Amino acid sequence: MSESLRTDLHEANRLSWNAATLAHNSHKGDQAAFFRAGGSTLFPEELELLGPLAGRMLVHLQCNAGQDTLSLARLGAVATGVDISDEAIDFARRLSAESGVPATFERADVYAWLAETADGGRRFDLAFSSYGAVCWLTDLDAWARGIARILAPGGRFVLVEFHPAAMMYDENLRLRFPYSSREPIEVQEGVGDYVAGSGEGLIAGEQTDGAQDFRNPYRSYEIQWGTAEVAQALIGAGLRIETLREWTYSNGWSPFRGMRAEPGRRFRMPDGYPDLPLMYGVSARLEG
C-alpha cells in the first residue's frame, strides 16, 4: 500500500461520517417505502455516463448510505457498495433488506478494499463514484491504480463530482480555499448536515424535519484535487479517458446562499453572479 496514504485521516473521517450519517438520514423519511414504490435517487448525468446497466457487475465506491447503489441495482446492475462509515453501511444493508432491492454492502477503507479485491481476483464491469468522494482521498495515484486493478478488461470507471473551482468558495461566495491543496485541510466542525441545508435538493422522497442544529463532535480532513490531477491519475493508471465534461449547475446540493433552484433537484448560481463550473464528469476505460 502507498506510503503516502494517510490512514490516520481516513479513520478521523470515518468517525465524523458516522456522526453525520445519522443526521443526514434523519431527514429522509421512509426510504424503504420510497424504493418499494420504484423511487430512484440518480440524476441523468451519471446515468448517461454509466450507460447500460442490466447484468453489469458494478461497484459503487464511497457509496455512503446506499441510496444510489440501490437505484443502480434497480436498473439491473449486480451492485456492490463500499464505504468507510459503519453507520452508512449498516443503514444501507437495512435499506436493501427492507426495500427488497438486492445489493451487497461492504464496510472498508476504499484503499484497503481495492487492494484486497484485486488480490482476490474479483473484477467489475463498472466502477462508479460520485458527489463529494474525491476530497476524502489522500493519494490519487494509489486510488486510480486500485480502480484499474479491479476492472475487467474493457471495464469502465465513471465519476461525477462537484467541481474543485466551486469548492474554493464558502457559502457566501467568498474565496476561501485553494483550487488544489495536495495537503489535508482540517475542518474543525467536521462533516456537516448538508442534507438539511439543501432540503428537497438532496431528498428524492419524503422529507422530514429530523435532526435539528446538528453539531459534529468529530473534525474531518479534506484535500482539494484539481480536475487535471484526477484525470492524470486515471491516465497514469492505464485508463483511457473517453469523456470529460463540466456543468454549470449542481445536482442536489445548494453550495451557496441564494442558489436558483430548477426542476430535477438542480441548482444554478445566484442571480448577479457569472456561471461557475459546479460539477464535472469523467468516463475512463481499461483497454482489454
Image (spheres, rainbow, N blue to C red):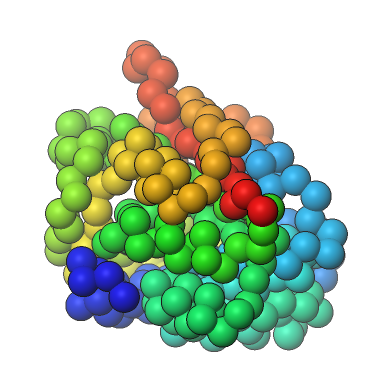
Q: Nearer the viewer, residue 254 or 117?
A: 117
Residue 51, percent across and down?
75, 45
Relative vertical location of residue 77 with respect to residue 177 in this rendering, above or below: below
| Residue 148 against residue 285 in the figure, above or below | below
Residue 214 location, x and y as percent?
32, 68
Tell me where residue 236 appears, x and y as whole percent.
Answer: 40, 48
Task: Determine which quarter of the picture holds residue 13.
Answer: bottom left
Q: How many marks?
A: 0
> Is any part of residue 202 visible from this angle?
no
Seen in the image, is 56 located left or right of residue 4? right
Query: Residue at position x 25%, y 76% from top?
Result: 7
| 259 left or right, relative to 173 | right
The answer to whether one can see residue 124 in this image is yes
The residue lying at 60 percent from left, 80 percent from top is 121
Task: Residue 208 in the image: state x and y as whole percent.
Answer: 56, 64
**What's the residue at 34%, 56% (across, down)?**
141
Q: Residue at x 69, y 48 (%)?
A: 50
- As rendered, which of 184 and 196 lies closer to the eye? 184
Q: Nearer the viewer, residue 247 or 121?
A: 121
Residue 252 vs residue 219: left or right? Answer: right
Residue located farthest toward the front when viewing the structure as drawn: 288
Give the position of the N terminus as an image quadrant: bottom left
